[in-house]
Amino acid sequence: MSHAMLLPCAALVALTALVWLRAIHERVAECRARGIAPQALATSREAARMLKNTQAADNLSNLFELPVLFYVLCLALAATGLGTPGDTAAAWAFVVLRAVHSLIHVTYNRVMHRFVAWMLGAAWLFGMWGAFAFRLAGR
């Protein structure tokens, strides 16, 4: 069972890679179209000031925030052997919520829709951590 917890991690890494590729494509395309020299974007402040399309890059940053807690949890569940089929299903649900968040962010970017997906994912993740901590404490 413990290795099954790693499959949702791999899926989230795949999502991160897709967003990363989109961010690179958008950055290069915008720089070429607008004649922006790469050195002009040397800092995040300069990039934010000069670039118009930063949704994919912003989402890529998001994929290194809460998901870090997800990766740690999945590894902890696998390492302790406390992972259950319910944990695996919950992990897949978190990945789906992150995918929905990313899809909204890199397409039409409606903030309230994105916020709902983010909040549901965060609450779900903290619930998963709570369940793990409860089982770990009772061990």
Image: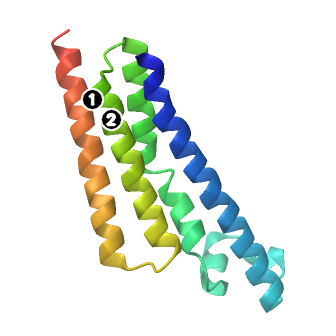
Left or right, 35 with respect to 21, comes to right
Residue 64 against residue 45 in the figure, above or below:
above
- Quarter of the rendering occupied by the C terminus: top left
Q: Amino acid at mark 2?
A: Ala
Distance from disc 1 to disc 2, alpha carbons, whole Å, reads 5 Å
Amino acid at dot 1: Gly
Give the camera-side residue of 24 and 107.
Answer: 107
Q: What residue appears at the point 42 percent right and 54 percent down from the top-left corner?
A: 98
Quarter of the rendering containing residue 97? bottom left
- Can I make out residue 94 in this image? yes
Image location (x, y in percent) of residue 123: 23, 50
- Can you tell which quarter of the image residue 57 is in? bottom right
Q: Secondary structure at mark 1?
A: helix
- Furthest residue to the bottom? 34
Q: Quadrant of residue 116?
A: bottom left
Q: Position of residue 135 (x, y in %)?
A: 20, 18
Residue bearing the label numbered 1: 86
Whether residue 121 sits left or right of residue 29 in the image: it is: left
Label 2 element class: helix
- Quarter holding the N terminus is top left
**42 left or right of 6?**
right
Marks 1,2: beta carbons within 8 A: yes
- Disc 1 packing (10 Å; few <14; some 14–19; many ≥20): few
Where is residue 50 shown, x and y percent of the image?
67, 86
Residue 46's disc is: none
Residue receiving disc 2: 89
- Position of 88 with respect to 129 (left or right) is right
Q: Going 51% across and 50% down the picture, which residue do you hit?
A: 64
In this rendering, does residue 66 appear at all? no
Identity of the residue drawn at 45% across and 24% down: 4
Q: Residue at x 26, y 46 (%)?
A: 124
